[in-house]
């Protein structure tokens, strides 16, 4: 029988591929009971990731997120965990919408007094389950493809706060900076960076050397990048020359991270 986390991802994968699913068919595929499948569907519906139907389920409006979420799942989780480790009790944090950034909140159990300002409805679905985390939604126009709130109202909401940390995502990054396909998303990132003491990019290595339509921030405007070990040594050196900190998460230990500082003479 698959573990719960694996079962959740399998269900989301079926929805992403097929657009719907049947409880009976899924139970047979997974080798579990109908009751177990229905329990899984209820949990995913509570997180806003699907809508249950008679005898099955269908995607919510976040089909694009459902398609992206399973991709590089392990890397995204490690990156999010490393970002969460930076957050302390009573911290103030901006979290921009994205499939990696949203996972940060899942690793904040046990923290108290943390205040999160976000334009991500996915962040909200996770944060609402942690009683000692305060979450403030920016407001704004709902953008279905990214599960985000954007536009003038969102920008006004962001500009009303100041945070120690901002965690942002990207459609692509390189030595030229971070980019996105979505102009209004770029505005949100820029606003968060302007009102945060430190801005950190959370991006798995598959995003490197990809270029989106809209330029957002230069690497010199970031405090650091958290990514995975898929980047080669030359790429790490290039990033290190432009960014104060590059944190590379690794799969081979419980402490899944290694710090690379731009002032270090050699790559580690």
Image (spheres, grey):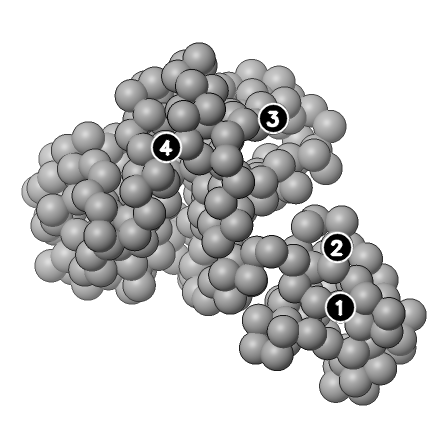
Mark 4 Cα within 10 Å, few/some/many (few <14, many 20+)? many
Callout 2 secondary element: helix
Q: Which residue is mark 1?
A: 57
Q: Quadrant of the N terminus?
A: bottom right
Callout 4 secondary element: helix
Q: Residue at x 74, y 86 (%)?
A: 29
Q: CA distance from mark 3 to mark 4?
A: 17 Å
Q: CA distance from mark 4 to mark 1?
A: 33 Å
The answer to which of 42 and 85 lies nearer the viewer is: 42
Callout 3 secondary element: strand
Image side of residue 65 versus residue 239, left or right: right
Q: Which residue is mark 2?
A: 45
Q: Which residue is mark 3?
A: 135
Image side of residue 228 versus residue 177, left or right: right
Q: Earlier in the sequence, mark 4 or mark 1?
A: 1
Q: Position of residue 239 (x, y in %)?
A: 15, 47
- Of circles 3 and 1, the one toward us is 1
Q: Which residue is mark 4?
A: 188
Q: Position of residue 2 (x, y in %)?
A: 72, 74
Establish if 246 lies above or below 112.
below
Q: Residue at x 52, y 26 (%)?
A: 138
Q: Residue at x 42, y 19 (%)?
A: 156
- Which image quadrant for residue 245? top left
């Amino acid at each position: 029988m698959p573990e719960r986390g694996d079962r959740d991802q399998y269900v989301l994968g079926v929805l992403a591929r097929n657009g719907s699913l049947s409880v009976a068919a899924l139970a047979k595929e997974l080798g579990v009971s109908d009751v177990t499948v229905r329990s899984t569907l209820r949990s995913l519906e509570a997180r806003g990731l699907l809508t249950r139907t008679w005898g099955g389920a269908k995607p919510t409006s976040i089909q694009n997120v459902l398609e992206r979420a399973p991709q590089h799942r392990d890397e995204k989780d490690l990156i999010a965990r490393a970002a969460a480790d930076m957050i302390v009790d009573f911290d103030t944090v901006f979290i921009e919408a994205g499939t990696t950034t949203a996972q940060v909140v899942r690793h904040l159990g046990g923290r108290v007094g943390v205040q999160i300002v976000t334009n991500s409805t996915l962040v909200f679905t996770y944060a609402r389950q942690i009683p000692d985390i305060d979450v403030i939604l920016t407001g704004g126009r709902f953008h279905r493809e990214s599960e985000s709130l954007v536009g003038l109202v969102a920008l006004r909401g962001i500009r009303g706060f100041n945070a120690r940390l901002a965690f942002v995502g990207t459609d692509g990054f390189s030595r030229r900076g971070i980019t996105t396909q979505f102009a209004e998303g770029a505005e949100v990132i820029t606003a968060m960076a302007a009102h945060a003491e430190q801005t950190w990019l959370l991006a798995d290595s598959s995003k490197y050397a990809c270029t989106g339509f809209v330029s957002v921030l230069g690497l010199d405007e970031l405090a650091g990048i958290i990514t995975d070990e898929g980047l080669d040594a030359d790429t790490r050196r290039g990033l290190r020359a432009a960014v104060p900190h590059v944190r590379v998460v690794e799969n081979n230990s419980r402490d899944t991270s290694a710090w690379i500082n731009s002032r270090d003479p050699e790559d580690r």
